[in-house]
Amino acid sequence: MSWLTQIGTVTLLSLKTIPRRAGSSAVAIVGIAGVVIVFVAVLSMAQGFFNAMHSAGAPDRALVMRTGADDEMTSGLSGPQTDIVKQAPGLFRDGQRAIASAEMFVIIDLPKRSTHTAANVPMRGIEPTTFQVRREAKIVEGRMLTFGTNEVVAGRAAAGQFEGLSVGSVVKAGQFTWTVVGIFESAGSVAETELWCDVRVLQGAYNRGNSYQSVLARLDTPEAYDSFKNWLTSNPQANVSVRREADYYAAQSVTLTRLIRTVGFAIASLMGIGAVFAAILTMYTAVATRSREIATLRAIGFNTFSVLISVLAESLGLAAMGGLLGGALAYLAFNGYQTSTINFQTFSQVAFAFAVTPALLAQGLAYALTMGLIGGLLPAVRAARLPISSALREL
């Protein structure tokens, strides 16, 4: 009998005997499944935040801020500066009108629906051109705000996460009381966490005069970015920095995404140690239960390598079942789950949905198989070294 045939025969026999050890096998499966659930859930939170931030950027949009500013909260532009931005080459124009939105960004306090605690919610002053700049944004409930009034439209995610943002509700912020007249969607991006209002009204509410914090510009084409940027950054009257919108939001997501993933791997590693010990105990039990069977196979000519592989295969089989179970439960429980967290760059809330992707499920399964391999290695070596004579005396 060839060594491949031996391995196949002994491995198949090992897998068929798993139901006889249902109790101990279930312990290993459940332990590994629990680790995979936590592993996938935490990483899906990071992935969801990453998706919300990255989906906000478009290749044909550029964000203009004050030179040296890292984010909109620390930026500041005067009215004349925004006028210069709107004269730059490379801008998309509707007739003579530049399609760009000079904007202001403030933080207001609203209670979370889940905890009723105050949260920092971003409120953005926009210009009438904003829906031509952000073409993915659309009103899905109610109507668009009337410019020149204290009306706001709320993002779909913000309306779901924070209290008092349904159509017809009233929000108090600054020196004004604002009326929510509509709900908008923006392809699941971070913009859906915001409230939008007329930038001129917002300036008055916060005594900002003719000042802004950024200009979001729509370009003729993505390739027009370089000419747009070079013209503005070389203009001493402008004193601005220019970034692609996608690059800006990608940088915004780095800190929190890295933190969540680091914590997720740390938690999963600690839990994984426990799961490995559960797998080791399970496989030692399996070896002890099958000692006479293994000795008999060795006595009739099966080599030690085939026995070692069969025990590892059983351990990997249990780990695969745990990994698949944990991945399925994580997907059902967390995929699409809406939550919000603070963005450390702007100290404002970002609402997003957990995203359990195929890549995360594959990582969870790979982690489960790694735990199974480690957990089955020592028992497999013990089985391969099992004294034939001692085991056969028990017959």
Image: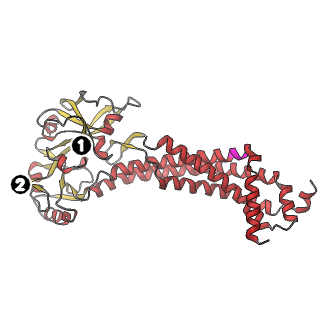
Q: Where residue 39 sits in the image (x, y, percent)?
A: 53, 49
Number of the label disc, if any, that sits on residue 277: none
> In this rendering, would 263 be left or right of 121?
right
Mark earlier in primary sequence (2, 1) = 2
Q: Amino acid at mark 1?
A: Lys
Numbered marks: total: 2
Q: Is 47 above or below relative to 116?
A: below
Please give the residue where the numbered disc 1 appears in the rendered image: 138
Residue at the image point whose x is 40% and y is 48% from the top: 48
* Quadrant where the image shows the C terminus: bottom right
* Quadrant where the image shows the N terminus: bottom right
Residue at the image point whose x is 91% and y is 58% from the top: 392
> In this rendering, would 121 be left or right of 293?
left
Q: Where residue 258 sits in the image (x, y, percent)?
A: 43, 53
> In this rendering, would 375 be left or right of 180?
right
Please give the residue where the numbered disc 2 appears in the rendered image: 96
Specify whether residue 237 is painted magenta: no
Q: Which residues are magenta?
A: 23-27
Q: Amino acid at mark 2?
A: Gln
Q: Is 260 above or below relative to 208?
A: below
SS under mark 1: strand
The local crowd at label 2, few if under 14, some if 14 to 19, many if 20 or more residues have their Cα within 10 Å, is few
Specify whether residue 24 is painted magenta: yes
| Closer to us: 314 or 48 | 314
Residue closest to the far left: 96
